[in-house]
Amino acid sequence: MANQKTRFSTDTLVLRVASGKLLLPAEIAARIQNFETTPENTLRSIRGPTPLIPTGVYDTSSEYGNMHGVFHARLERSGGVQDVTLIHTGTSIYYHRGWRRSNPLKQLVGPIGSSALLEAELTDNNRPQFPTQFELTDRGIVIIPQNRSRAYFFDGEAILPLGYDRSPAPPIAFGPETSNSKQPNRSGYAVDRSQLDGTYTLNRDFGFGRIGTLDLFQSTDKQGGRLIAGSYQGAVQWIDYFGNLSSISPRSNEVVLSSQKTTKRIPDALLKHIVWQGIDRGPDGTVARRLLRTKDIKNSGTAALFIVPGNVGFGTITPEANVPDNDSTVWPDNVPDSWLVAEAPTVMPTPIFKLGRFSMGRFWIANTDDQPGAVIPFFAGRYGTFGRGTAIYPDPRGGEITGLWSTGGGLLAFTKTSTYMITPNDSGDGFRSGAVSSDIGCVAPSSIANMSDGSTVWLGREGFYMYKGGQIVLLSEDIRHIIERVNWARAIGACAIFNPETREYRCWLPVDASNKNQLCVIYDGQGFRVRYGEKLRAVCVTQDHRRYTLGAGQARSAEDGFESGVWVLDRETRARNVSGRTHTIETAWIEWGRSRTRKTAKTIYLGLRESFNGSGTVEVYRDWRKTGTPTYTDDLNAKLYSPEDPPPFWGAAKLGSDNEWVTKRPFWKRIDIDIPSCEVYKIIIKTSDPIEFIGLAIDEEPKTGGIGTRIP
């Protein structure tokens, strides 16, 4: 019989984080798998997931294809706030419109010939690539598919390609061909309103022309002045439904005004009109166009293009469109040079890009097809309009941008091997880039997330890093054994979120040569845990009171296989019982600091909270050997609750009765073991049923006879 007087108990081990190191404090586990923290600071078995939209519910597709992205946002609309869930699967992007509709999914973007709002060809493959990127702005959502696909903009009602990827054709200008003021020009549009022979060459209702440069003091007859020879050119710019501008068209043919004098005292009679024809119509989504024109190139001192005012009247200009439609092709121009005051911005065609982020009041894009090392800001208020010459190249070596993230100090821009911060210039005009680290980068843009304290965590080539207070630190030294298993050829597709309920950073990444993100690494601010059971391509957190975590990809099904879909993680329904997931807590090698002295482990006390009837095992290994058959195995038996005070169970408890459901209470479960004369020992708790773990303690007895005879 055991001598109770010689027994002593270890401290209660409140295991919450794990490490792969050999020598660890007893309070740090060697492995915690498939557990989540609760607000009460316990470990609870992972629940669910449950499908957001069960297969076959909607008409557009009976099965999901390859998952590429999922996103949730709340958009401010005139009728109130609108919930938007976007799903990119296969060659289509869907919009979840709510369960009250007969078809909850609306196809936003789909192949040619589909019923999608916008028909476009999206590439669908499983090559290593970033997940589809989404970014919320004050006017809508920017959607950035990969595989050389164009980006799109969705405001809750309309969806269009982001900006314009090409320029309009140049307009055709008609004006005077010669100084012969008696004849109309080739378009039938008169050259002026002079009365040299007593007849009008321009309808009286048109009034005098306003275009041209007059010299009132150099007339040979000193009676009226003369028109100085000059020239003009024009161009066109499209404007889409969201206010984005196209790049400016090539310039038109040159309109030449020859020198001309008048014998009358009406110098304005020499000024001309110009008519613009062939104004190019824009693609679908174009709602207006801008006519641009130079001032008198030969006499004004500038050849810049200006926005032609759309209103007639001195000093009036229109900042938007002077051709407020996408149908007309002719525009009569009688605007003097003095009214041309707003110079047309120089816009580049919207490139194909891989990354986008809203920061410092601007939308930034990066990693374009022709400039993978460039970061480019948009024009204020126009999320698909980008100015020429505004690109920033953070890495002087031209490294490819692999991540963008907004922080309180500016915009973090990553390459695979370096990190930079983009901030405004001190002058307030433009931006500059400064190096944060020349050795630490980011390999997966969707692995970046902010913790609750404002710090930023991401996956780099050496593991997980944190940026806080201008410094970057490595977080994952304790799980180097997991980092070494990462499939780095596929790591660019890793995805992560910060879970606001558990306040944990969760990152799904590929390990062990897998091409899917089948392992989730969890960081709670103190240490790491892992979870299995999902193979997710993309994740997001709903931006509403629910704060659900949505995952797009595969999840373990009730048949012990994997099923594709969009999943609500950590939620479950009785209609879908997920099996095949094992919840494991493995301690470190306990008492390694006193391994010179042998001892006997006699009793394990598990601190648990009441749970369902279930089963599990407790395994004990000894003396640094975790192979083969455990030294000791015991069943947790079918009762994970205190037999002295059995609780009411969910599904059986009734409101208002003695068996009413109450808050689950903690209890201790005793397991007698016998690990004689050991140096160190390790305890592994495994169960496939729900369990809530608080901590554990062990009763030991010292081995009589002093120090053991063998020291490893």
Image: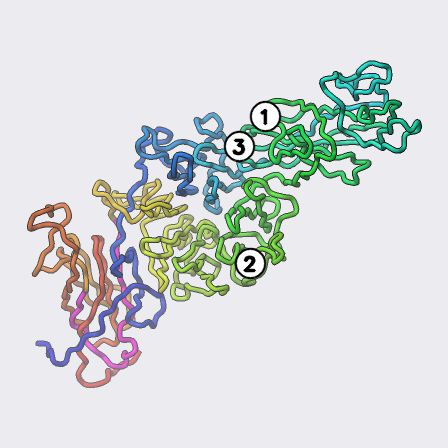
Q: Quadrant of the C terminus?
A: bottom left
Query: Could you tell me how many numbered marks the image carries?
Result: 3
Q: Which residue is mark 1?
A: 326
Residue mark closest to the camera, 2 vs 1: 1
Magenta residues? Answer: 580-606
Mark 1 to mark 3: distance in Å?
11 Å
- Magenta stretch: includes residue 599: yes
Residue at figure coordinates x 41%, y 66% from the top left: 477
- Across and down, in percent, residue 67 comes to 41, 41
Numbered circle sitting on residue 237: none
Amino acid at pointer 3: Tyr
Local secondary structure at mark 2: strand
Decide: is 212 above or below 641.
above
Q: Check disc 1: other Cα within 10 Å, few if <14, some if 14-19, many if 20+.
A: many
**Picture residue at 57% right of the left edge, 61% below the top:** 435
Contact between marks 1 and 3 (CB within 8 A): the answer is: no
Q: Is residue 143 visible?
A: no
Q: Looking at the image, which residue is at 16% across and 59% down?
A: 665
* Mark 2 and mark 1: Cα distance apart in space: 43 Å
Q: Would you say the residues marked 2 and 1 are in contact, meaning their CB atoms lie under 8 Å apart? A: no
- Left or right: residue 257 compared with residue 322: right
**What number is the disc on residue 420?**
2
Marks 2 and 3, Cα distance to the nearest angstrom? 35 Å
